[in-house]
Image: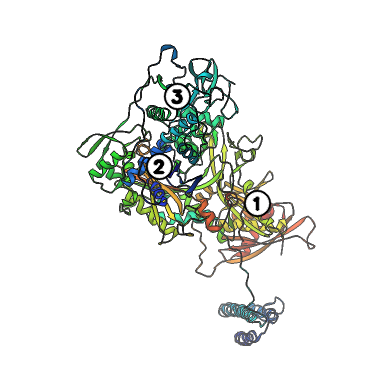
Amino acid sequence: MNTLKDKISEINSEYRQRIGDASDAEELDTLYLSLFSKKHGVVTALMKELAGLDTEGKREVGPMINDLQSRLKDELEEKRRDLQDHMMQDPLIDLTYPEKPAVWGMLHPTTQLIREMNTFFRYYGFSVVEGPEIETEEFNFRKLNLPEGHPATDLQDTLYIADDILLTTHTSSIEARLLTQQKPPIRVAFPGKCYRNETVNSTNAAFFHQYQGFAVDKGITMEHLKGVLEAFHKYLFGDDVILRYRYKYYPEVSPGLGIDLKCQFCHGKGCQVCRQRGWIEVLGSGMIHYNILKNCGIDPEIYTGFAWGMGLDRLVMQRYGIDDIRKLYGGIVYK
Amino acid sequence: MRIPLEWLKEYVDVKGPVAEVAESFTLLGLMLDKPVYEYKEGRYSWPILDLEHRMDRSDWLSILGCARDYAAFEGLSFKMPPVHAEPGLAPKQEQIVDIKVECPDVVKRFNTKVFRNIKVVESPDWLKNRLKAYGIPAINNIVDITNYVMVEYGQPMHAQDLAKMEAQEIVIRRAKEGEEVTTLLGETVKLTPEQFVLTQAGKATVIGGIVGGNTTGVDKNTKDIVLDAGNYDQNNIRRSSRSLKILNETVLRYDKYLHPELAQHAMERAVYLILELAGGDYYENVDWYPQPVARGKISLRMSRLEKVGGVKIENNRITEILTALEYRIIKEDGGVFELEIPYFRTDIEVEDDVAADILRINNYNAIPLRLMNMAPPKEITPEIYTFEEKLKDLLASGGLHEHITDPILPYEEGNTMQVRLENALTADKSALRTNMRSTLWPVLKNYEKHKLTDINIFEVGKTYEVNGAKNKYTSYKEIRRLQVLHKNTTSTPYENTEHTKKILASLLQGLGIEDHRLEKTDGTTDIFIHDEKAGSLEVYGFMLLTEILLKHAKPAQRVVSDLPQYSTQNLSLIMDVQKPFGPVFEEIKNFDDNIVEVEVEEEYTGKELAEDKKAVLVKIAYKTNQTEKFRAKLLKHLKSKFKLEHRD
């Protein structure tokens, strides 16, 4: 038994030495075999010798062999990694050689802009919701103060599926649904897909994105509308933006409010980006129409609210230098 | 609305440079749409403001309407042009041009006057140039006056040569199916009973409210005319003009709601101009107006104004604005203004519209900014929204690019599930997608065109289905899906499949979904999650229903803080090349609770094996140390259940 213990200690010191001295992976393979090969391995031989011991001997020496085995295996593994690290220091490695990027996934530009906007509105206590894209005339028009034949339907050449079923022409239909379903106070933002029966060209597509939202509570006034949306413009375009507030009619609101951003390219002089206007219209807004609140079962004498809406695609195209809306939804690739 | 600055100056003393005028118009609601441009003709050089018209305000399609608001905004006085309000000569009975209206549902008023012995000549310079500056060509004094008053007041007018009229009467009736009218522009238009016409001896001469005909027009030989100012149902004009595809200055005004009273005021102005510029005798004629429409009334509470606008506006300022906008204050008592709405303000519907008038004329810039200080309401973002965001993040972190594609595509004949568009403009955009692969695959092809070889893309979106009656809203379904496409153009289909599956496995792992299986049925390979069909797999990608993913997703347990305590062993199984391995894999996984993980290390065919055999090397991790015992039990079970061999 003692000879066996001696052997263990001998093998331990000898092989640790040899593993430490090994200079390549091949040498480690040889050492592994001479230790653990089924036929000739010295540790395997120890196992066989162990079988000859009595129970007490087995109980004492067995764990020692196991311990030796795992320690040497660890040593071998560690040395292997050391050798690999060493290879990294190969003089042929030239770190100044120009690098190439690995491909990392990218979110769609519109998704990125939506998330950026969501972040702002979530900070101000808004939830983000969605609605159906297949809608009824009831929610897309009627509840939104757009009776049949209303001149505003001029702007909304609608894609119909059946008599009063259509593809939503604006995300406002979500407003009608939420006002009907939720009890105030409500604060929501809703990015969404919209469809119109447009002759398709580089700036108009039948398929596009809008971002709308509203807040309904006791005591909301146009001061809050201006306050929140000014903060939004600063968040999106920088603190030095110059804004212009003007009356603008939308059937879903009264009073309506248009907000323009002084063109950051030409500083108001007029250029291609602002279509020579000097100002860029980012969104339309206003106080939710008295009749809409009433139609949706909310008492407009108790609650007031503001709503805003904007197209996303033009902003996205400007940011990413895309000149054709059709490319944005099917014609772009990421490198 | 185009406004020649020179014309505007007739009603209001315009202050400051044209850029400032444009800015004021913009703030009050008439945004400068295009840069100010010049009308140049002889000695005239007039700036023209092209202002965006927003549909609700019919009076903003008149120079007077725009001038009135501008004067109110700038605090300037506003002057109406001269009119001739006195009645004309009483006609003899036989001289009356009778007016018969057979369709009173669409005609609300038809106001007519008769002029005899007029001189039809060229209009004076000022009138010709104002019209031309606006964008209407000058013809002769009578035609020009009707156009001038239309632009000035917003009321379309129309003059006919009495001598060319076959009968001394105008009958207004619905058009007959297929009835034809040749317009002023010489175009022949076919009508339907949707439209109504002005007729002469049974023949249609004018398409009511839309365009005049070429038979009774005024020319240089005309001596006697009948002049009309009509008021019609704007919805009829809107529909008719759109279906006839006729859009002109007349339609532009008639398809808005004009108050019938306007026909009176515009007529008085036209009478004045005709007597000034064409002379002759002016006779009364029929003013067909069976149901006069009264001006509306509305109250404005100061408390409501403050509730909407936030800002407090003084009483006398409110009075000043209301007066400038021509509201008549009937009574003002206890903070409530009782008002008569000016006839030309057909847009005023609710009290808040009057509040809007006060706030905008007072300038929106006077409203201070404020952030909301109420407690934020309950968070109601749906779980699926947040989940799909996470899904996108996971895939992007795995190197896949997100795309959004247009779901409108061609209709597939015979696909009864497909949602079809009723009024699509083109056949290639006439229905909605029933799977996302069809719109995402062209994107993959586009990557190939860009010579990109390793393509990994996805879309999170919807597909659309109809099931049942097409006119029932509940027949329509929107299905939320994830579509992933992978293709490495330098790899074999086998390698592509392996990679596609790797994306699937990583995604499910990231979502904490452990229990899933793949099952082949009739040519498609379905993905089951907890025995629920959740999607399908193919060589170049897979589809998953995101609602089902959400149902089974858990926080992924991928953080390991201890070294593994499991014992592992490898198992080399030999089976028929044709047989799917999926079921065997499922069997091993579910064999015993002691098995904690099963992984396929390698799959191969080759010379060591018979031609119709493949070997699959499986790595199994056990909780127990008694691996040998388990191995024997497992092998016995597998051999009895499947036709397979084991190799040491």
Answer whether labels 1 and 2 touch (C-beta < 8 Å). Answer: no
Say which element carries label 1.
helix
Question: Could you tell me residue A173's position as x and y percent?
Answer: 45, 40
Residue in view at x 43 percent, y 23 percent:
B280
Q: Mark 1 or mark 2: which comes first in sequence?
A: 2
**Numbered disc 3: what chain?**
B
| Sequence-wise first label, 1 or 3 | 3
Point 58% across, 79% down: residue: A71
Q: In this orientation, which residue lies closer to the viewer: B371 or B603?
A: B371
Secondary structure of residue under mark 2: helix
Mark 2 crowd level (few <14, some 14–19, many ≥20, 10 Å Cα) = some
Q: Mark 2 lies on which chain?
A: B
Q: Is residue B579 left or right of residue B611?
A: left
Q: Are marks 1 and 2 on the same chain?
A: yes
Please give left or right for residue B263 compared with residue B449 in the image. Answer: left
Q: Mark 1 points at which residue?
A: B583
